[in-house]
Image (cartoon, rainbow, N blue to C red):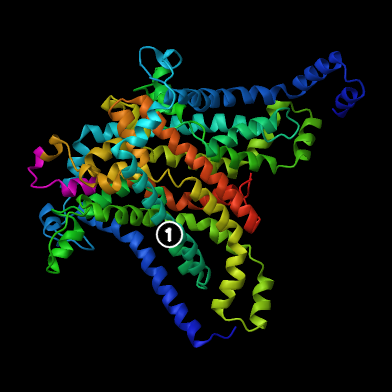
Amino acid sequence: MNVTTEVVRDRPSAKSKTSAGWSILKRDWFLYLLLIPFLLWYAIFVFKPMYGIQIAFKDYSVFKGIEASPWIGLAHFQQFLESEYFWRVLKNTLVISFYSLLFVFPAPIIFALLLNEVKNALFKKTVQTLTYMPHFISVVIVAGIVTNFLSPSSGIVNLLIEKLGGEKIYFLAIPDYFRTILNSMTIWQGTGFAAIIYIAALAGVNSELYEAAVIDGASKWKRTLHVTIPGILPTIMIMLILQIGGLLEVGYEAIILLYQPVTYETADVISTYVYREGLVNGRYDMATAVGLFNSVVGLLLIVFANRISKKYTESGLW
Amino acid sequence: MLESRGEKVFYVFNYIILGLFALSTLYPLLYVLSASLSSPQAVVTGDVFLYPKEFTLTAYKAVFKENGVWMGYANTIYYTVAGTFTSMVLTICGAYALSKKRLKGRTFFNLLISFTLIFAPGMIPMYLNFRDLHLLDSRFGIVIGFAVSTFNFIILRTFFQAIPEEIEEAARIDGAGDVRVLFGVVLPLSKAALATISLFYAVSRWNGYFWAMVLLRDEDKYPLQVLLNQLVVKMKPSESMLNDISYSTGETIIYATIIVAVIPIIVVYPFIQRHFVKGVMIGSLKG
């Protein structure tokens, strides 16, 4: 097998290049055969729609199709930036993401650190099994449980409030509660499973460092602060970069399930706006432009976060 | 190791906090189960808190009488089985081919595919693509359109890369061709990884709702999750469910529907959990 490559190196003429091409194809024909359906799938279902993003700059008409529709430049972007919805959806997206960074992101780290201190193996295993479980339940069911528990007529939460002598509250119709409900739901469903990656990282922290710290008389808290957390910092940074990259994505599937027109003022984010504008109102070109705005900002954020992280912690995605 | 008083207090609190967190994941499901087995009156008045009151199975009878639920179940099973199979075939093809360092163009293709992790085409271009391909309201569209997850592809590629080349060489010396090497050597060696990836695909198929809701029109094609969105989240139990039993409220029917939908996952969950943990571990090693 190495012979062919050496031949190519000795005589880099056009003729031997094609024959080298043939011998590569002859050697790896099976791998290329496997690659065809796989790449075809990406071409049809990922890259072809990427080509369709151009309608963000066009006056798209269903009858003319993507290519024949006339270019109109940045008109859709301008219209979006000037619309009354722009600030609402941008603000909601940023606020929900900010709360998510503040509360949802650290939850699995804290959970993993606490679990790491548990010595009773059975207790540890039980807690893990129970807390991983919600990850496997669909977001529809979780949202269903939330809506029904918070229901003003017969939800358990309001029944309890009433028993304790309080007034019933229609939680999901009050804009002020929406973000808290959404992020609590995410924490409930995702914390246990998201902790796995940190639990694995914790298992990899050098135990000699702990022993040295104990000999030096470091307290539990100091050991956590100076040995454990630095040990899992690369993992935390990578997860943080990913989180920042997805900052504008926010869990729109969950939002679409939970929000209603009365809570749009705090619940409507860029993605849900794209969904309504595009799939409900049929303004495909406008919605694509808004979606592209979202993706590009997301892309810039992840590149930026990666650069910062590489500069200060030497760990990054690429 | 000697423990200071502060550390002892910490340990006690730690057990309490973790215990409460674990219970908080268990309780909602326990309540839903109990409520689904109680009389509507007991649920509405708040008598049910931990275990069923005025035990009855009428809510389940109403759920099982509903044809839509059976249909949704059948559709979900179809999407899960056909979808997971399609996903596995395509993912194995790509992951095996692109795991080979000697393959020309490998770096380029890998970069191209990794790029889709940080930049996706977006909801509307994807929808229009399905429309242009005449895959709206099509079961086949649901199965093929979401076949490959780039994340799963990377996990499997990483796994294939870790198989020593010598093992394949040895099989070749014994006279095995390319096809035999893949099916007779590589895939049997990768059983654990294949199981993990299949489960990742199967669970996301079972739970998927958004694109099914967007792409399907005909109710006969709805998977369970789309149906649940109407029955459980929008809290609109169908007419026929309510009429038969002359309920004052659909509350217990809703809870019974949740249980019926979640049971398969809860039953298999203890067996698949460790595979998932393993998958996350492989995935966390950078591909």
Left or right side of A90 for B68 = left
Which stretch is magenta?
Answer: B243-257
**Quarter of the figure with residue B123:** top left
Q: Is residue B245 magenta?
A: yes
Look at the image and tell me whether residue B188 can be seen.
yes
Magenta span main SS: helix
Dot 1, how many residues are within 10 Å of its Cα: few (below 14), some (14-19), or many (20+)?
few
Classify the position of the C terminus of chain A by image quarter: top right
Front residue of A300/B149: it is: A300
**x, y (%) of residue B38?**
17, 55
Left or right side of A13 for B125 = left
Three-letter amino acid code at the position of disc 1: Leu
Left or right side of A62 for A164 = left
Q: Is residue B27 magenta?
A: no
Q: Is residue A257 above or below residue A97?
A: above
Q: Mark 1 highlights which residue?
A: A102
Front residue of B274/A220: it is: A220
**Quarter of the figure with residue A221:** bottom right
Classify the position of the N terminus of chain A by image quarter: top right
Front residue of A275/A22: it is: A275
**x, y (%) of residue A290?**
39, 34
| Residue extending furthest toward the right | A10
